Image (cartoon, grey):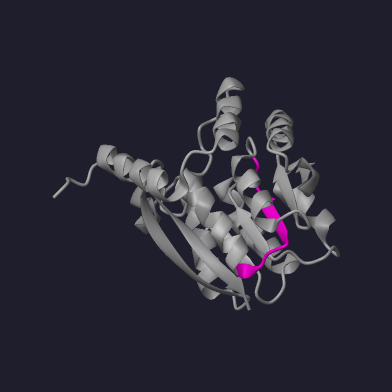
Amino acid sequence: MAESTPQNWRAADDYLADVLVGHDPTLDAALAAQRAAGLPEIEVAPVSGKLLSLLARISGARRVLEIGTLGGYSTIWLARAVGPTGSVVTVEAEPANAAVARRNLDAAGVGGRVEIRIGRGAEVLPSLDGTEPFDLVFIDADKESNTIYLDWAARLGRTGTVVVLDNIGREGEIVNEDTTDPRVIGTREGLRMLGEDARFDATALQTVGLKGWDGVAIAVVV
């Protein structure tokens, strides 16, 4: 039996990506562009990108909100999933990241489906109030603001909207009630909100792989 180590987690993730995701030159080029621009290597893993795509397709999502664009890797997955008649609104705090994302989206042939709104989520999301409800919301931004983003996910969604909250594992630190790490505190508060707020029905899964010991929460707006 293989030993449970970060090296083996990564090898298993690579194997699953090879078998179930395959290699996509467009997505590979997007990652290469992110690396060349010096963006942090915090995009979702290929298997997670595929999960987002499948969740969008399973739910029949045609209008998607993404909070945290980075270089547009996950955005490409989502834009492909909504199809040529769908749309993605993605929010990115850093203009330089948004510029890389725009180039990647255009190169992937899905730029026309994606609107990038630049600014901090807490400031941008209220501007979407009153627009057509979103069918799926993917939250992958600063963890300290998780509860703010979840609140807006419920407000901007509808009954049946799928909400995905990324990076909930935090190397197991989520069980530490005495943590002083604001990212862990924000994650714990987000998970508590998903469990207690009557607007959501949710669960969460731990993961190990390319991103270490992590996880994802998946909810539906009720």
**Where, quadrant-wise, is the C terminus in this rendering?**
bottom right
Q: Nearer the viewer, residue 81 or 136?
A: 81
Residue at the spot x=62%, y=69% of the render?
59
Residue at the spot x=23%, y=42% of the render?
5
Q: Nearer the viewer, residue 180 or 201?
A: 201
Residue 84 is a magenta residue: no
Q: Position of residue 172 (x, y in %)?
A: 34, 52
- Residue 53, above or below 70: below
Can you tell which quarter of the image residue 215 is in? bottom left
Q: Position of residue 107 (x, y in %)?
A: 70, 33
Left or right of 113? Residue 45 is left
**Callout count:** 0
- In the rendered image, the residue lying farthest to the left is 1
Residue at the spot x=56%, y=55% of the render?
52
Q: Position of residue 115 (x, y in %)?
A: 79, 46
What range of the chain is rendered magenta?
59-69
Q: Position of residue 37 (x, y in %)?
A: 62, 22
Can you tell which quarter of the image residue 62 is in? bottom right
Q: Nearer the viewer, residue 2 or 141?
A: 2
Left or right of 189? Residue 104 is right
Query: Does residue 186 show up?
Result: no
Left or right of 22? Residue 149 is right
Q: Nearer the viewer, residue 125 or 148?
A: 125
Query: Does residue 157 show up?
Result: yes
Residue 63 is a magenta residue: yes
Can you tell which quarter of the image residue 109 is in? top right
Residue at the spot x=72%, y=34% of the render?
98
